[in-house]
Image (cartoon, helix red, strand yellow):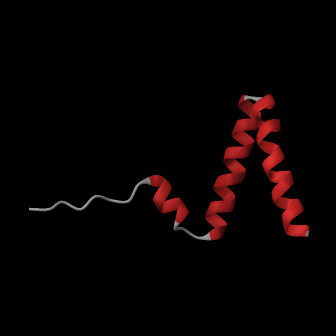
Amino acid sequence: MTTQRSPGLFRRLAHGSLVKQILVGLVLGILLAWISKPAAEAVGLLGTLFVGALKA
């Protein structure tokens, strides 16, 4: 007898629509900035690099 497990939250987000992924990223970024400003500034570097790569 085999039981099927539902996919985890991360797997559902990773294979979901791009719009959902962007919204989740925005919400997590806002929460991180609200909870810990220094941590948000450190992670903000990744966003800056990403936008710079898009412009290149």
Looking at the image, how many numbered discs can be counted on the residues? 0
Q: Is residue 33 above or below residue 8?
A: above
Nearest the viewer among 13 and 55 is 55
Q: What residue is rendered at 84% in x and 54% in y?
A: 49
Q: Is residue 12 left or right of residue 28?
A: left
Out of 34 and 52, give the one closest to the viewer: 52
Which residue, as the protein is rendered here, is positioned at the far left?
A: 1
Against 33, residue 52 (above or below) is below
The residue sitting at 63% across, 61% down in the picture is: 21
Check the picture and name the quadrant holding the N terminus: bottom left
Identify the image quadrant of the C terminus: bottom right
Residue 43 in the figure: left or right of residue 2:
right
Q: What is the x, y in percent for residue 43? A: 76, 42
Residue 48 in picture, x, y percent from top left: 86, 52
User: Percent from the top left, x then y, of residue 4?
Assistant: 23, 62
Residue 53 figure quarter: bottom right
Relative height, residue 33 to residue 9 (above, below): above
In which quarter of the view is residue 7 placed? Answer: bottom left
User: In the figure, residue 28 lies in which quadrant?
Assistant: top right
The residue positioned 14% from the left and 62% from the top of the image is 2
Give percent across and percent down for residue 13: 53, 60
